[in-house]
Amino acid sequence: MIAIAIDGPSGAGKSTLARRLAAQLGYVYVDTGAMYRSIGLFALRAGADCGDEESVAALLPEISLELAYEDGAQHILLNGEDVSEAIRTPEVAMAASAVSAHPSVRAFLLDAQRSLAARQNVLMDGRDIGTVILPHAQVKIFLTAAPEERARRRYEELAAKGQSVTYEEVLDDVRLRDYNDTHRAAAPLKAADDAVLVDTTGLTFDESFEKMLGVIRARIGG
Ligand code: DC
């Protein structure tokens, strides 16, 4: 099996680029952020304190996650409910960031993510794929961009969906999530030693795509 690990901070264009690359290569795309977001959503709905590990850990036995693919697009099912849209709000993003700091949540998802990679070629994106989940991935890319550019992209995405947020709020969120993701004790966001760094600041989507495809082809051919 071939595994491609793509890690990096939020808003670097990871999921859009990863989805397109997976389609191009004929690999299964696994968006691990959607898994953390689904747990965050479940915890929010349950009225739990997302920052409190014990409260969140107590909910895990009630959670079942499944990935389904429709026309190549990943849908995530939380206890059978398609929550693919519901998890894309700033509120759920913050909840995901909080629950992802808990070792019990990370352990809960580790097996699920590894077993997805054991049975098919995957292109998996997240924060700790190259460092923790798939340390033997044939290709590792650490994708990043300046915080202001990442905030601008996310702001445009949210505005297009009609969500009422300001650019400043989005930038604050990006900075806070960066801080949380890089400073947590459990699997903090950092590039694997053998990851190739790709910075998309100032690059168009197509330029970023070509750059990443070049890195992948240099490693696995094709
Ligand atoms: O990529 P995203 O914005 O959908 O991720 C949501 C949150 O989940 C983010 O704060 C980081 C966390 N996350 C993680 O800790 N590990 C992963 N492999 C993927 C996401």
Image (cartoon, rainbow, N blue to C red):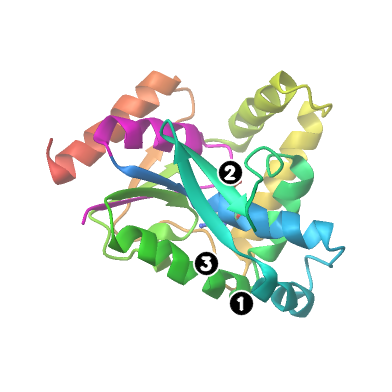
**Element at badge 1?**
helix
In the picture as drawn, the residue positioned furthest to the left comes out as: 221
Specify the label residue 10 is tagged with: 2
| Dot 1 amino acid type | Ser
| Residue marked by disc 1 | 104
Q: Nearer the viewer, mark 3 or mark 2?
A: 3
Indicate whether 104 appears above or below 67: below
Q: Earlier in the sequence, mark 3 or mark 2?
A: 2
Neighbours of disc 2 within 10 Å: few (<14), some (14-19), many (20+): many
Residue drawn at the location 80% of the way across and 35% of the way down? 169
Q: Is mark 1 within 8 Å of ligand 1?
A: no
Residue drawn at the location 48% of the way across and 46% of the way down? 68
Query: Between marks 1 and 3, how big is the CA–CA gap?
Result: 9 Å
| Residue marked by disc 3 | 109
Please provide percent x and percent y for residue 83: 66, 45
Indicate whether 209 appears above or below 117: above
Between 120 and 179, the one nearer to me in the picture: 120
Query: Between marks 2 and 1, how big is the CA–CA gap?
Result: 22 Å
Specify start and end residues of the magenta stretch as a single range: 1-26
Please provide percent x and percent y for residue 218: 16, 39
Q: Is residue 21 left or right of residue 62?
A: left
Residue 97 in view, yes or no: no
Which quarter of the rendered picture does the N terminus lie within? bottom left
Q: Is mark 2 within 8 Å of ligand 1?
A: yes
Q: Is residue 184 left or right of residue 165?
A: left
| Dot 2 amino acid type | Ser
Please provide percent x and percent y for residue 179: 66, 55
For the residues labelled 3 and 2, say whether their Cβ atoms are less than 8 Å apart. Answer: no
| Dot 3 amino acid type | Leu
